[in-house]
Amino acid sequence: MAFVLLHFAQKSFAQKGRGDRPSIPLDHFYAEPENRNALRVLLSKFHFSFSTGYGRTFYRQDLSDFAILQQQDSLPLIFGKDFNIAGGNISSGYNYWFNDLQSRNNINFDPSTDFIVSADSAALKFTAPGMSIPLNFSIHFEFDRYRVGGGFAFEYHRPGNFNPTVYEDRISGYEPNFGSTFFKKYYVMLGARVYRYYEYSLSVDANIGAINLTSKFNKSIIQKGVYLNLGATVERDLSEYFRVFVKPSFDIKSFTLNIPETDLTIPQSMNAFYLSFGITYRIPELPKCFLKQCTTQVNHQHGNMEYRSRMHPVYKKQNPHHGENYPRLIKYKGKNKKKLHAY
């Protein structure tokens, strides 16, 4: 009878404990953790990213203030559209106008063989492709779903040949006077996460800054415009500290070539599309466990201090189940997977 009463009392106490309070108060076994280091918590909001990929540039030159002369077996020449042919020649023109200017004087004009057209009668433009391999480094601060930061890009670039968009059969193209160069970009970044599905997320961002065209461009006659990049980043969380991502983006950038001693200019856009792949890492807010022999695979306490695992790799998502680092046993791997009874 006493045993029945004791069992009933224990059962009633256990049921009474359900609800707001656990049946077994865990604070009897674990010390209350101290507040985390404020500096580490702040630093953990910073994310460091590195990416590379491929870029395609779309050069476009606007020659609306010019006329073009094409002579046999020579490069095309441009000159002001208000030209005057006196005595069968043109006083001066330019047969190269991309990153620098090359001029010619006293150009003979033969109406029987030469072809001439003015921007008044045609939309004169030259276009060219280009390819790039960028290396991009950035750091940004995340709060809630927003991100603010900045970065630096180092880009290997090769421009293609320039060809006219009109009279392609009458006007020849020209090639740049260099094979390749390196661009540098500096920017600030503003962005936000717009969608999340489990470990996948979609963010949009804008990079605003400046581009260094290097010494291959005659900077004394070039006026650069603002550099703007708009992109969408698809990220996959591998852990709470490590992500991989793919990012399509579009560059909007340009420069203007100023013709010395005249009021003529050649606006040149060099917009580009990029597809980048990269990784993002953030500093953990918890220090690594100080016990070398500790095999705990999740964040845990020793005394009243919290630590992160020494065993769990930073690139793998934590999971509280036992054996999370090796969810598949060795006896089911490799040559053993064909055996009915590996051991």
Image: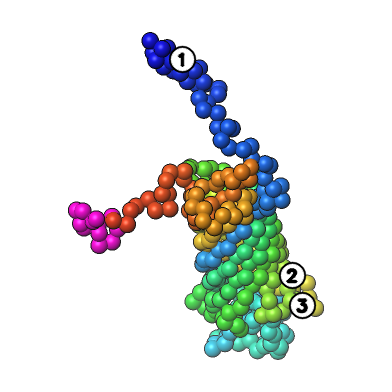
**In the rendering, at what x and y percent does residue 73 appear?**
54, 88
Dot 1 amino acid type: Ala
Residue 274, quarter of the rendered image: bottom right
* Mark earlier in primary sequence (1, 2): 1
Dot 3 amino acid type: Ser
How many C-alpha atoms fall within 10 Å of the one at disc 2: few (<14), some, or many (≥20)? few
Task: Name the residue that disc number 2 marks.
Answer: 223
Q: Report the span colored magenta.
A: 332-343
* Mark earlier in primary sequence (1, 3): 1
How many C-alpha atoms fall within 10 Å of the one at disc 3: few (<14), some, or many (≥20)? few
Spatial CA span between label 1 and label 3: 93 Å
From the viewer's side, name the closer residue of 214 and 145: 145
Spatial CA span between label 2 and label 3: 8 Å
- Identify which residue is drawn at 57% across, 82% down: 179
Work out which residue is located at the far front of the displayed protein and give it. 2
Task: Name the residue that disc number 1 marks.
Answer: 9
Dot in front, 1 or 3: 1
Dot in front, 1 or 2: 1
- Identify which residue is drawn at 67% across, 48% down: 41
Report the label total.
3
Judge whether 77 appears above or below 343 on screen: below
| In this picture, residue 179 sits left or right of residue 169 | right
How many C-alpha atoms fall within 10 Å of the one at disc 1: few (<14), some, or many (≥20)? few
**In the rendering, at what x and y percent does residue 284 appear?**
61, 52
Work out which residue is located at the far left of the displayed protein and give it. 340
- Identify which residue is drawn at 58% across, 44% down: 301
Task: Name the residue that disc number 3 marks.
Answer: 220
Does the residue at mark 1 contact the one at mark 3 (Cβ under 8 Å)? no
- Identify which residue is drawn at 68% across, 42% down: 35
Judge whether 3 appears above or below 343 on screen: above
Q: Secondary structure at mark 1?
A: helix
